[in-house]
Image: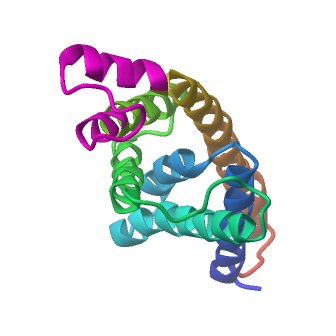
Amino acid sequence: MTLKRNLLIIFVVLLVLSAVCRVAGFAPQLAIAIFAGAIIRDKKLAFALPLVSMLLSDVLYEVLFQLGYVNYGGFYEGQLLNYFLIASVTVFGFLIRRWNVLQIAAATIAAPAAYFILSNFAVWIGGGGWFHPKTFDGLMSTYRDGLPFLRSSLESTIIFSAVLFVGYYLLQRFVLEHRYLAGVKL
């Protein structure tokens, strides 16, 4: 198999696993967006990867909802805005200039924080959630309501970013380097 085919298989497996993980309550989409922004040179593809992951998980949610296994469907009002916000997190990956722990950690913390701020603002301004009034106190109440989501978003983004970046580093360092040294055609 060629390197490109192997990488394609890895990305397909990643997308399927991310859909399953999200349905299990552990969403890796923000980590995938950061990772894609950091490693994929084609910017359109970098933006597309987290969107495809999100779409697959939404389809899975919808199927499980239709079968009566979950209480809500995968498709909902405001979904396009959510997709835009997920894709926008890819920019944090573009900002990783050097692969070091500090830059990756900063992006891993900043991305869910930005997503939290923007998505909860959108909920508040759109009258969603608990329908808090359009006042500063209402906005702060909306943010307070979203704190459990921020925590789980931070946890899953930290864990999945570590898995993705460390896994990619190890793949580059030990698998691809050894193939090249052994004279194997990539």
Q: Is residue 144 magenta?
A: yes
Residue at (40, 41) in percent of width and height: 96
Image height of 22 relative to 180, above or below: above
Image height of 181 relative to 90, above or below: below
* Whole-percent x, y for residue 184 in the image: 77, 77
Seen from the viewer's position, the closer of residues 183 and 98 is 98
* Whole-percent x, y for residue 30 in the image: 51, 46
Task: Identify the image quadrant of residue 61.
Answer: bottom right
Image height of 183 relative to 164, above or below: below
Q: Is residue 128 magenta?
A: yes
Residue at (29, 40) in percent of width and height: 127
Report whether 108 appears left or right of 171.
Answer: left
Assign the N terminus to one quadrant of the image: bottom right
Assign the C terminus to one quadrant of the image: bottom right
Seen from the viewer's position, the closer of residues 69 and 45 is 69
| Overall secondary structure of the magenta section | helix
* Whole-percent x, y for residue 157 in the image: 58, 37
* Whole-percent x, y for residue 148 in the image: 57, 24
Residue, far top: 137
Report whether 153 appears left or right of 34.
Answer: right
Residue, far bottom: 1
Residue at (43, 34) in percent of width and height: 107
Residue at (19, 27) in percent of width and height: 134
Seen from the viewer's position, the closer of residues 48 and 27 is 27
Q: Which residues are magenta?
A: 120-145
> Number of numbered discs present?
0
Task: Identify the image quadrant of residue 83.
Answer: bottom left
Please, which colouring scheme is shown? rainbow
Seen from the viewer's position, the closer of residues 17 and 38 is 17
